[in-house]
Image (tube, rainbow, N blue to C red):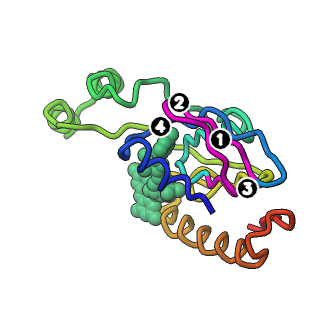
């Protein structure tokens, strides 16, 4: 079985790379095309790519169909994210000015919306979602455990069909 993440590391030296298409299924696999490398065939594509999952978007539809509104910013531009925070918290008192000074000095920053993913199925043919991409919930406080349990259940489901995707039907 081709493991997409291993291939990603081998082909790109571990850098992030967008999957461009994962919708073309054949009787023996799913044909995946990438942004910066050759297309490959996989037995299974697991979209464990987080709450803003590209795999979910490609296989199931746009994020707005399944998740809360997404903040509009460049996630690679820390300066832009600091500016957003500065605008939102401008004029707020108490400890906030000190916190904003620290944000301004910080080497990196993590900014995202509070989001919840609601989707009525986790698999479509040979593409399956796992973890936050399938059932992410920023404020739940149990997302990591759920992602691990989901991986355990998925492994069990794969073992149950002996890798024969003709009988595939995830019961998550
Ligand atoms: C502020 C905050 C606090 C939280 N606190 C808790 C807590 O206390 N306890 C708890 O259990 N959970 C907590 N969570 C939730 C928890 O972090 C997630 O539920 C968990 O990380 C989900 O795991 P995941 O593997 O599904 O997704 P992620 O951890 O988001 O991993 C997805 C991975 O996919 C990678 N990726 C995305 N796109 C691509 C691409 N195109 N190519 C290659 N790689 C890609 C990302 O870089 C990332 O490494 C918190 C979340 C947030 C935001």
> Please, what secondary structure does the residue beneath circle 4 have?
loop
Magenta stretch? 29-46
Quick check: is the Cβ at mark 2 less than 8 Å away from ligand 1? no
Could you tell me if residue 139 is visible in this image? no
| 51 vs 102, nearest the viewer | 51
The quadrant in which residue 11 appears is top left
Give the alpha-carbon distance from disc 1 to disc 4, as whole Å.
12 Å
The residue labelled by disc 3 is 122
Say whether marks 2 and 3 touch (CB < 8 Å).
Answer: no
Q: Residue at x 18, y 30 (%)?
A: 104
Quick check: is the Cβ at mark 4 less than 8 Å away from ligand 1? yes
The residue labelled by disc 4 is 17
Relative to 158, 18 lies left or right: left
Residue 127: x and y, percent? 71, 51
Residue 72 shown in magenta? no
Ranked by sequence position, the earlier of labels 2 and 3 is 2
Badge number at residue 32 = 1
Crowd class of label 1 (few under 14; some 14 to 19; many from 20; radius 10 Å): some
Crowd class of label 2 (few under 14; some 14 to 19; many from 20; radius 10 Å): few
Give the alpha-carbon distance from disc 1 to disc 3, as whole Å.
19 Å
Give the alpha-carbon distance from disc 4 to disc 3, as whole Å.
22 Å
Residue 32 shown in magenta? yes
Crowd class of label 3 (few under 14; some 14 to 19; many from 20; radius 10 Å): many
């Amino acid at each position: 079985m081709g493991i997409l993440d291993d291939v990603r590391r081998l082909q790109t030296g571990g850098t992030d790379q967008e999957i461009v298409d994962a919708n073309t299924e054949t009787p023996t696999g799913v044909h995946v095309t990438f942004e910066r490398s050759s297309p490959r065939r996989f037995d299974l594509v697991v979209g464990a790519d987080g709450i803003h999952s590209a795999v979910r978007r490609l296989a199931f539809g746009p994020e707005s169909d399944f998740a809360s509104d997404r903040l509009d910013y460049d996630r690679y531009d820390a300066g832009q994210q600091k500016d957003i925070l500065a605008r939102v918290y401008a004029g707020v008192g108490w400890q906030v000015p000190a916190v904003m000074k620290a944000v301004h000095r910080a080497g990196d920053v993590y900014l995202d919306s509070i989001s919840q993913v609601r989707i009525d199925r986790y698999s479509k043919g040979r593409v399956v979602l796992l973890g936050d991409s399938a059932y992410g919930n920023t404020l739940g406080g149990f997302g990591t455990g759920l992602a691990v349990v989901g991986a355990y259940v998925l492994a069990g489901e794969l073992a149950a069909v002996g890798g024969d995707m003709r009988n595939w039907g995830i019961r998550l």
